[in-house]
Image: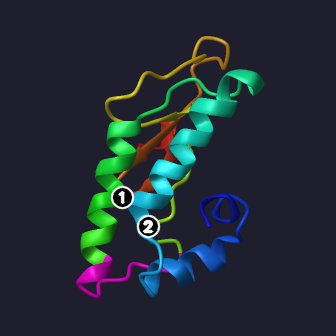
């Protein structure tokens, strides 16, 4: 089933999470393994944060088990482009962007001159 999950539609993953047929931690581990296996081939990753991903997945699993559903994407792993500043992660290529970047704060993304 794990291989099938890698290509499942997001809405299907959400349904599987809400019905507890798969956990957010299982999805995070699956996609982290795929990043490790395929990331170097495509050279498309700057920073991978497995500890952060697994902690967020464990939190989502606890919330889903308690019946707290934040929305259809709750518990689904995702990646963020490296020009979004996330606390604790390096911000790459800001010089090349003319110091225009985006900041994630409180679950919202702002352009650096809008804060």
- Decide whether the magenta segment is chiefly helix, strand or loop: loop
Residue at point 45%, 84% (across, down): 18
**Is the N terminus in the top left, top right, bottom left or bottom right quadrant?**
bottom right
Residue at point 35%, 48% (across, down): 54
The image shows residue 109, relative to residue 60, as above or below, that is above
Residue 51: image quadrant is top left
Residue 95 seen in render: yes
Residue at point 43%, 45% (across, down): 104
Residue at point 44%, 59% (across, down): 26
**Is the C terminus in the top left, top right, bottom left or bottom right quadrant?**
top left
Query: Disc 1 to disc 2, how far (Cα)?
Result: 6 Å
Residue hosting label 2: 75
The image shows residue 77, relative to residue 44, as above or below, that is below
- As drawn, the label of residue 57 is 1
Q: Please state if 35 lies on the left or on the right of 7 as rendered.
A: left
**Residue 78 on image: x %, y %:** 55, 53
The image shows residue 90, relative to residue 4, as above or below, that is above
**Secondary structure type for disc 1:** helix
- As drawn, the label of residue 97 is none
The image shows residue 64, relative to residue 26, as above or below, that is below
Membership of 69 in magenta stretch: yes
Part of the protein shown in magenta: 64-72
**Residue 50 on image: x %, y %:** 40, 38
Furthest-front residue in this view: 1
Q: Earlier in the sequence, mark 1 or mark 2?
A: 1
Furthest-top residue in this view: 95
Membership of 26 in magenta stretch: no
Residues at circles 1 and 2 in contact by the CB criterion of under 8 Å: yes
């Amino acid at each position: 089933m794990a291989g099938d999950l890698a290509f499942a539609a997001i809405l299907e993953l959400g349904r599987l999470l809400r019905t507890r047929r798969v956990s957010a931690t299982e999805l995070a581990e699956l996609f982290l393994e795929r990043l490790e296996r395929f990331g170097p081939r495509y050279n498309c990753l700057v920073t991978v944060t497995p500890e952060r991903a697994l902690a967020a997945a464990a939190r989502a699993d606890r919330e889903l088990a308690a019946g707290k559903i934040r929305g259809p994407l709750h518990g689904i792993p995702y990646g963020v482009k490296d020009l979004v500043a996330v606390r604790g992660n390096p911000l790459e290529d800001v010089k090349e962007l003319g110091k225009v970047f985006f900041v994630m704060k409180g679950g919202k993304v702002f352009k650096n001159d809008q804060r």
